[in-house]
């Protein structure tokens, strides 16, 4: 087929698709295009943490804004980052039979799969946020809004190696839920990147119950002991904004001063901004949790009301450092970034 013929066929396909889209839009009920066009839709939204959680609050604010903009009835579910609790709450959510559920992916593919199957049978639209569940989505549909875990983890490890001035043979500590197949992919990625650069990595496994995220002070004895046992550690990585925001407490408990150790991790929060200001925090990977709240609700509304396909959005946004943290500081203080 000639280039000219292929071009003509391509143009014809584009015109046909555009015509079909216009025809579909013209048949939508008028209220679908008005403000609060999603007002008849019922959604259950999983925030992840407890009420007031540093990261979860930003997700919650995004979801609340979407609900205010679009009008759905939203039930907000708080789980204290406890994966077993999330599974039970998802079971209850499916039983209620809302129009849509926005679920945190922390429990992983195996735990979510049978409940996603039931939701599919019941015609419940599904979205997943923060942690991807690719096997579930492949089997029963749904979309994902969040960072790609392993990819973001590896990028953070490489950036920490570079900005931290690390070299082969140096020691670093990495904390994370390494045993969790889906959620732990991010921290395993960070460990892999550091090891590939020749860094010796000491891994500290966080409890599967999520209690260190709910109350970061519970990790003080473990982190302090690790630093005392490995006084030559050059860097410490943290699995979430709750713990990264608590870095001054960890370092002071271990008798360390600002800048003694290169502290890095994920997310932004008012506490992390203060950590940058005080010289305690040197690097964080931003995953824009506000979008992880807003976009799943938007997508569920679009699926239920407009019949659109689920969204898939990578919210990974690069890195925050002592050189650029002021750009996001005000929004972080407002729990919007």
Image (cartoon, grey):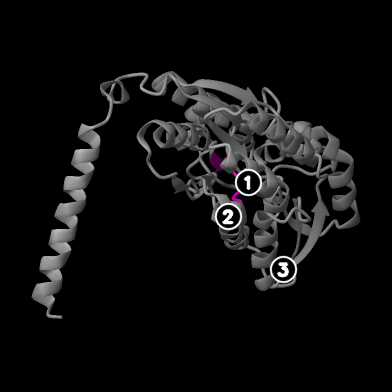
Question: In the rendered image, is residue 166 in sight?
Answer: yes
Secondary element at tag 2: helix
Distance CA(mark 2)–CA(mark 1): 8 Å
- Disc 2 + disc 3, Cβ < 8 Å: no
Q: Is residue 145 left or right of residue 232?
A: left
The residue beneath circle 3 is: 199
Q: Earlier in the sequence, mark 1 or mark 3?
A: 1
Residue closer to the observer: 1 or 168: 1
Residue closer to the observer: 179 or 239: 179
Distance CA(mark 2)–CA(mark 3): 39 Å
Q: Which mark is residue 41?
A: none
Magenta span contains residue 127: yes
Q: Earlier in the sequence, mark 2 or mark 1?
A: 1
Crowd rating for badge 2 (residues with CA inside 10 Å; few <14, some 14–19, many 20+): few
Q: Is residue 190 left or right of residue 178?
A: left
Q: Which mark is residue 117?
A: 1
- Outermost residue, bottom side: 1
The vertical placement of 57 against 295, above or below, is: above
Crowd rating for badge 3 (residues with CA inside 10 Å; few <14, some 14–19, many 20+): many
Identify which residue is drawn at 12% across, 80% down.
Answer: 2
Q: Quadrant of the N terminus?
A: bottom left
Which percent across, then down, holds residue 85? 77, 34
The label nearer to you, 2 versus 3, is 2
- Disc 2 + disc 1, Cβ < 8 Å: yes
Q: Which of the 4 image quarters holds residue 87?
A: top right
Q: Which residues are magenta?
A: 126-134
Q: Earlier in the sequence, mark 2 or mark 3?
A: 2
């Amino acid at each position: 087929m000639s280039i000219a013929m292929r071009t003509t066929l391509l143009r014809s396909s584009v015109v046909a698709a555009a015509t079909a889209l216009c025809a579909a839009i013209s048949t939508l009920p008028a209220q679908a295009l008005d403000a609060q066009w999603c007002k008849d839709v019922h959604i259950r939204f999983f925030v992840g943490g407890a009420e007031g959680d540093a990261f979860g609050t930003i997700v919650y604010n995004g979801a609340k804004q979407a609900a205010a903009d679009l009008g759905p009835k939203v039930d907000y579910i708080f789980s204290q980052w406890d994966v077993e609790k999330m599974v039970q709450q998802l079971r209850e959510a499916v039983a209620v039979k809302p129009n849509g559920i926005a679920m945190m992916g922390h429990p992983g593919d195996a735990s979510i799969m049978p409940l996603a199957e039931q939701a599919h049978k019941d015609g419940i639209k599904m979205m997943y946020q923060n942690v991807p569940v690719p096997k579930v989505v492949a089997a029963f549909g749904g979309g994902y809004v969040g960072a790609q875990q392993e990819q973001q983890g590896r990028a953070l490890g490489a950036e920490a190696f570079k900005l931290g001035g690390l070299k082969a043979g140096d020691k670093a500590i990495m904390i994370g839920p390494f045993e969790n197949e889906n959620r732990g992919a991010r921290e395993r990625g960070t460990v892999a990147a550091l090891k590939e650069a020749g860094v010796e990595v000491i891994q500290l496994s966080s409890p599967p119950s999520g209690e260190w995220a709910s109350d970061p002070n519970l990790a003080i004895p473990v982190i302090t002991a690790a630093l005392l046992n490995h006084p030559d550690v050059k860097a410490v990585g943290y699995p979430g904004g709750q713990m990264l925001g608590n870095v001054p407490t960890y370092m002071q408990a271990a008798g360390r001063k600002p800048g003694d150790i290169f502290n890095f991790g994920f997310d932004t929060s008012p506490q992390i901004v203060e950590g940058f200001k005080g010289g305690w925090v040197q690097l964080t990977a931003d995953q824009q949790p506000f979008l992880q709240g807003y976009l799943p609700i938007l997508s569920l509304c679009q699926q239920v009301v407009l019949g659109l396909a689920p969204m898939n959005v990578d919210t990974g946004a690069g890195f925050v450092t002592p050189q650029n943290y002021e750009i996001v500081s005000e929004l972080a203080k407002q729990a919007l970034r």
